Amino acid sequence: MDLELNGKVAVITGGSVGIGLAIARGLAAEGVHLTLCARNGERLAAEARAIRDDFGVEVLDVALDVTSPSDLNGLVTAIYARFGGADILINNAGTGSEEKILEAEDDRWQYYWDLHVMAAVRLARALAPAMIGRGGGVVLNNASICATQPLYYEPIYNTTKAALVMFSKCLANELIPHNIRVNTVNPGLVRTPDWYKTATIITEGTEQTAEEFLQGIADQYAPIKRFASPEEIADFFVFLCSARASYSVGSTYYVDGGWLNVIT
């Protein structure tokens, strides 16, 4: 299947690890040139080199914090200087939270709001004009099943991811006339380094291994009884970026191994 992606330019936030890195490699395999950003510059540069070596595409790597408007302005300037804009924007940067609503201070709410919502708003606002000039484009926002089916211990994450889904729908309605397709992906359990780190911390000093802990989580929540690999989620993103998904717009897709317990 020809995805008609060769020569396109994609911007991926949180592109040095986990789902973001898997998406980057999946798009690079289709001949897409990349701008990747993440906070850990050393790891980001190493992954960018690996992608160049493996796939022969151009990769611009920019170390930054997406919660910083000035950092994002610098990223946008670099994108326009190198590629003249972008055809694809994937807002992927994010992380889980752990708090109680009655105890979390304003600055914690503000951080996750900037991370999960405002970074997507700012980048879409900055890059959409060039997409319009190129005749169209794709914006994909990586939210979470928690936007619909919240986990009790991360109310701020649940709330900001739900806001990201609504932003995506509103942006889709605004950009449809310009041939820009906006969609959201809500993954379920994905085997990222963060999950393994959490499992290692929780099981330290116990008889349970990290692997056993993770399998227990999968058994409890996912009817498929396992975590997804980042590559499985990335394959869906790559498809949504492609011309093969040309009628997919303004939608939210659950890639969750059957975890969602309601009909939407």
Image (cartoon, rainbow, N blue to C red):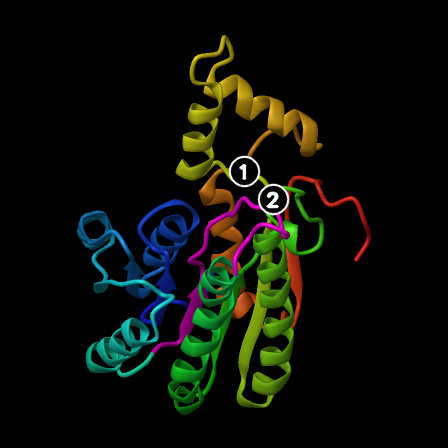
Left or right: residue 208 versus residue 51 is right
Q: Are marks 1 and 2 in contact (CB under 8 Å)?
A: yes
* Along the viewing direction, whichever of 241 and 78 lies nearer the viewer: 78
Q: CA distance from mark 1 to mark 2?
A: 8 Å
Residue drawn at the location 48% of the way across and 36% of the way down: 191
Dominant SS of magenta comes to loop
* Label 1 residue SS: loop
Q: What number is the disc on residue 188?
A: 2
Q: Earlier in the sequence, mark 1 or mark 2?
A: 2
Q: Quadrant of residue 89?
A: bottom left
Does any portion of residue 4 appear in the rendered image? no
Q: Is disc 2 placed on a helix, strand or loop?
A: loop
Does residue 208 appear in this view? yes
Question: In the picture provided, is 143 more to the left or to the right than 7?
Answer: right
> Going 47% across and 35% down the picture, which residue do you hit?
195
- The residue segment tinted magenta is 86-105
Image spot of residue 19 (x, y percent): 43, 48
Residue 113 spot, x, y in % from top left: 51, 65
Q: Is residue 93 magenta?
A: yes
**To which residue does mark 1 refer?**
228
Q: Amino acid at mark 1?
A: Ala
